[in-house]
Amino acid sequence: MDFFRNLFNPGPAIPREHKAEVDQFIGELIQIGKKDDFLAEHPGGLFNGQCHNIRARAIGRRLNEIGGLALMEFVRDRVRKKLGINLTAHLEYAWNDIGGWVP
């Protein structure tokens, strides 16, 4: 079903001046998910007091500034294709309360 959704709804229109930045964020989120995860059991280091990956949250805030919730959902879907449902669920929780995001 995702195939047809992506085929007919390729995502939000990303302003040309932000396309490279968004692509970079997608790649960075995939690397974070593979290497460090988006959630931790204990705060500290790469993770804030809520055990959310600090860099992933910063990326989420920037995506919200660029394109709002629609862009965040678009990026989440691209990350899911590479990392799968479980790690993407961690990203969704890490983005909690950014721009109205609710996991």
Image (tube, grey):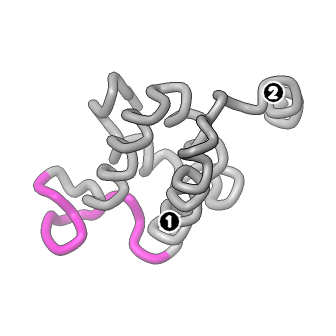
**Pick the front one: 64 or 47:** 64
Identify the residue position indicated by label 2 in the image.
5
Q: Secondary structure at mark 1?
A: helix
Q: Is residue 42 magenta?
A: yes
Q: Residue at x 50, y 65 (%)?
A: 28
Q: Position of residue 90 (x, y in %)?
A: 43, 50
Q: Is residue 103 magenta?
A: no
Q: Position of residue 69 (x, y in %)?
A: 47, 26
At a point 14% along the width and 64% down the height, the residue shown is 43
Q: Amino acid at mark 2?
A: Arg
Q: Secondary structure at mark 2?
A: helix
- Where, quadrant-wise, is the N terminus in this rendering? top right
In the displayed structure image, the side of residue 14 where residue 1 appears, left or right: right
Q: Callout 2: few (<14), some (14-19), or many (20+) C-alpha neighbours within 10 Å? A: few
**Residue at (46%, 77%) from the top-left corner?**
35
- Give the residues drawn in magenta, as a range: 35-49
Give the label on residue 28, or none.
1
